[in-house]
Image: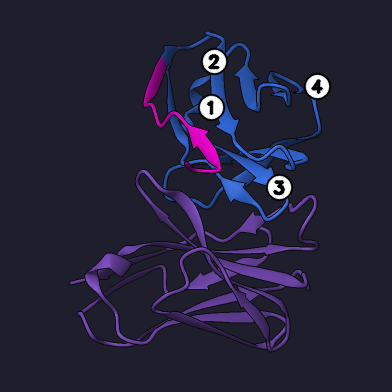
Chain colours: A purple, B blue
């Protein structure tokens, strides 16, 4: 998966607990993204980053925060997980944004919030 | 109205069939049109992309864009069981995905 590692691969947690998902890349791509994938909704952008400490909101950012302290790492945090955040989360990277965005995806994290 | 609409299927065809996957989009400003393929329990991977209208062919796959009708198509010739996957169309800029069509090619 193009030098992208997501961890953990699976996570079960309880409502109200904080959860952090990690994405690590070895491609030195500028842009990093967090998507969630749900049946009937496809892939929806949560947050993205255009550089170290530079992030912006996506379509479904409520309840999520992100941080990027190093080029290679992009963290997604659910401050207080809810059942509606049960989903498959994908990290992606790209060299450019705004024109031809060739995204490379990780293998995903299956998150269940009980 | 969603910016990109895609029939979710599922679509099941016999091996060797020609497959047609389609999407419609609403914003005429989109310039790049992409198809991603996603195998079960994997992340999507870029299959093909086209710029503006016209056709692009890559082996058994042909991507077609009709900007006048805002219609995107992916054709798969001589389909194989290994083509069984979910296919997602996407439009750019500010990449927006369709919901995906699940395809099964039966041997």
Residue B30 sits above or below residue A85 on the image: above
Q: Earlier in the sequence, mark 1 or mark 3?
A: 1
Q: What subunit carries mark 1?
A: B
Which disc number belongs to residue B54? 4
Residue B16 sits above or below residue B59 on the image: above
Q: Nearer the viewer, mark 4 or mark 1?
A: 4
Q: Nearer the viewer, residue A58 or B40?
A: A58
Q: Is residue A23 visible?
A: yes
Which disc number belongs to residue B19? 2
Q: Which residue is mark 1?
A: B83
Q: Nearer the viewer, residue A51 or B39?
A: A51
Q: Nearer the viewer, residue A106 or B29?
A: B29
Q: Are marks 4 and 1 on the same chain?
A: yes
Q: Is residue B87 visible?
A: no
Q: Which residues, given as a range, are shown in magenta?
A: B1-12
Q: Earlier in the sequence, mark 4 or mark 1?
A: 4
**SS class of the residue under badge 2?**
strand
Q: Earlier in the sequence, mark 4 or mark 2?
A: 2
Real-space Cα distance between discs 4 and 2? 18 Å
**Is A41 left, or right, of A97 in this rendering?**
left
Q: Earlier in the sequence, mark 3 or mark 2?
A: 2
| Residue at the image position 49 percent from the left and 50 percent from the top | B42
Q: Earlier in the sequence, mark 1 or mark 2?
A: 2
Q: Nearer the viewer, mark 3 or mark 2?
A: 3
Q: Which residue is mark 3?
A: B92
Q: Residue B2 in magenta? A: yes
Q: What subunit carries mark 2?
A: B
Real-space Cα distance between discs 4 and 3? 16 Å
The C terminus of chain B sits in image quarter: top left
**SS class of the residue under badge 1?**
helix
Q: Nearer the viewer, residue A95 or B104?
A: A95
Tell me if mark 2 has few (under 14), some (14-19) or many (20+) residues whose alpha carbon lies within 10 angstroms of its own: some
């Amino acid at each position: 998966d193009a030098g992208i590692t997501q961890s953990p691969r699976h996570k079960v947690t309880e409502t109200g607990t904080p959860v952090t998902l990690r994405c690590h890349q070895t491609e030195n791509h500028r842009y990093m993204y967090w998507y969630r994938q749900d049946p009937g909704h496809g892939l929806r952008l949560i947050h993205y980053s255009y550089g170290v400490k530079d992030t912006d909101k996506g379509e479904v950012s409520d309840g999520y925060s992100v941080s990027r302290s190093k080029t290679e790492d992009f963290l997604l945090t659910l401050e207080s997980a809810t059942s509606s955040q049960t989903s498959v989360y994908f990290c992606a990277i790209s060299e450019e944004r705004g024109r031809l965005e060739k995204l490379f995806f990780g293998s995903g994290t299956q998150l269940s919030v009980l | 109205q969603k910016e990109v609409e895609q029939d979710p299927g599922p679509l099941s065809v016999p091996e060797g069939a020609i497959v047609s996957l389609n999407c419609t989009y609403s914003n005429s400003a989109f310039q790049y049109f992409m198809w991603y393929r996603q195998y079960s329990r994997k992340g999507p991977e870029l299959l093909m992309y086209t710029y503006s209208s016209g056709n692009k062919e890559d082996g058994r796959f042909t991507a077609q864009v009709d900007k006048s009708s805002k219609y995107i198509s992916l054709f798969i010739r001589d389909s194989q069981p290994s083509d069984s996957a979910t296919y997602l169309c996407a439009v750019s800029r500010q990449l927006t995905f369709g919901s995906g069509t699940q395809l099964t090619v039966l041997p």
